[in-house]
Image (spheres, helix red, strand yellow):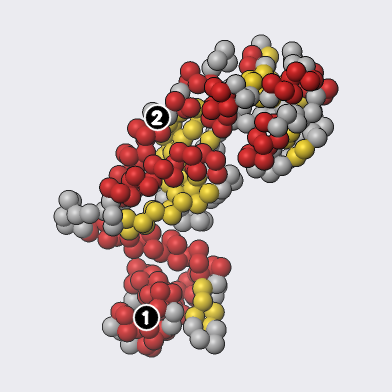
Amino acid sequence: MDRFDELQIFVAILDAGSLSGAARRLRRSAPAVTRALAALEERVGTRLVERTTRRLAATEAGLRLAEMARRVLADYDDAVREDDNAPLRGRLRITVPNVFGRRHVAPAMIDFLDLHPALQVELVFNDRNLDMIEHGLDLAVRIGPLPDTGMMARQVGQVRRMLVASPAYLARRGTPSSPRELDAHDIIFSEQRAGTEWRFLEDGREFAVRLAPRLIVNEIDTMLLAVLAGRGIGRPLSYQVAEQLAAGTLVRLLPAYEPAPLPVQLLVPSARHMAPRLRACIEFLVPRLTALPVLQPSACAKNA
């Protein structure tokens, strides 16, 4: 039995919930299905399913392998499809940053699904850069520089980190004229990394300002609530506060000291043998995202 066959059987076992159910679905003997599972577990080197009183359940390793196996099987179906005009089928798993994903990617993917009724899209919201292979992801939307992984990336825009505060806070506490004056202000910190410091640029050279925040949160919406309420100075990404800056409910501070723009990119594990559904998704997303005003260079220029 070849390895592709083993993956088909493994997925059928999980879908059916039992070895006998998979055997019926595939029209194979129960012993053949049992042997295929045993061979696959031997090849992987770990148990892939656990037996409960009523059905089989995938282990953590089994769940990871199942995600990858489904992608392999779906890609095979795409590769052997004879009719190039056939409807796109299968599933796309896309990881997106929380706020950007909610505001811009999710609406785009809803429209994309309207164009392709046979497709399924799974959006995985996470501000961490998930390992695409490990998590069985087809596409990632990433903000910031990427490590040199050999994956294919396509830039669709850029954003900046910028200091903002409410007019009420500035009227009460004054406006800083330099990042070095931030130690005299209330800081609302929300960046997802170790340490509490902000980095700035001055005459092309980077420097850090250590902070003693009044409030530390692990997501952007709470930080913005506090800043809008006049509780201190925060540092969101430019797209996250574009509406508030335009409305005057927030004020941009110290733009001359802002660090370099951060690229917004689409990332795929490989451009080779790309499934038609993934290629169609990228071709749909690229013009949609590049047209967003909040990702244009003018939207995050230092003198904006």
Answer above or below: position of 168 versus 35: above
- Quarter of the image containing the N terminus? bottom left
Q: Is residue 109 visible?
A: yes
Pointer 2: residues within 10 angstroms few (<14), some, or many (20+)? some
Pointer 1: residues within 10 angstroms few (<14), some, or many (20+)? many
Q: Is 220 displayed left or right of 174 in the figure? A: left
Question: Which residue in the structure is indicated by mark 2?
Answer: 290
Answer above or below: position of 226 versus 133: above
Real-space Cα separation, disc 1 to disc 2, in angstroms:
45 Å
Q: Is 218 displayed left or right of 110 in the figure? A: right
Q: Amino acid at mark 2?
A: Thr
Place of residue 168 in the rendered image (x, y in percent of width and height, measured from the top left): 72, 23
- Quarter of the image containing the C terminus? top right
Answer above or below: position of 229 versus 217: above
Place of residue 288 in the rendered image (x, y in percent of width and height, measured from the top left): 37, 34
Q: Residue sitting at 69 percent across and 25 percent down?
A: 165
Q: Residue sitting at 49 percent across and 80 percent down?
A: 56
Q: Residue sitting at 64 percent across and 20 percent down?
A: 251
Q: Quadrant of residue 302?
A: top right
Question: Which of labels 1 and 2 is toward the front?
Answer: 2
* Mark 2 residue element: helix
Q: Is 63 displayed left or right of 214 in the figure? A: left
Q: Residue sitting at 80 percent across and 20 percent down?
A: 173
Place of residue 110 in the rendered image (x, y in percent of width and height, measured from the top left): 37, 47
Q: Is 23 displayed left or right of 245 in the figure? A: left
Q: Quadrant of residue 22?
A: bottom left
Task: Between residue 279 and residue 231, name the one nearer to us.
Answer: 231
Task: Between residue 291 and residue 55, name the one nearer to us.
Answer: 291
Place of residue 183 in the rendered image (x, y in percent of width and height, measured from the top left): 82, 24
Q: Amino acid at mark 1?
A: Ala
Question: Which residue in the structure is indicated by mark 1?
Answer: 22
Task: Between residue 168 and residue 252, name the one nearer to us.
Answer: 168
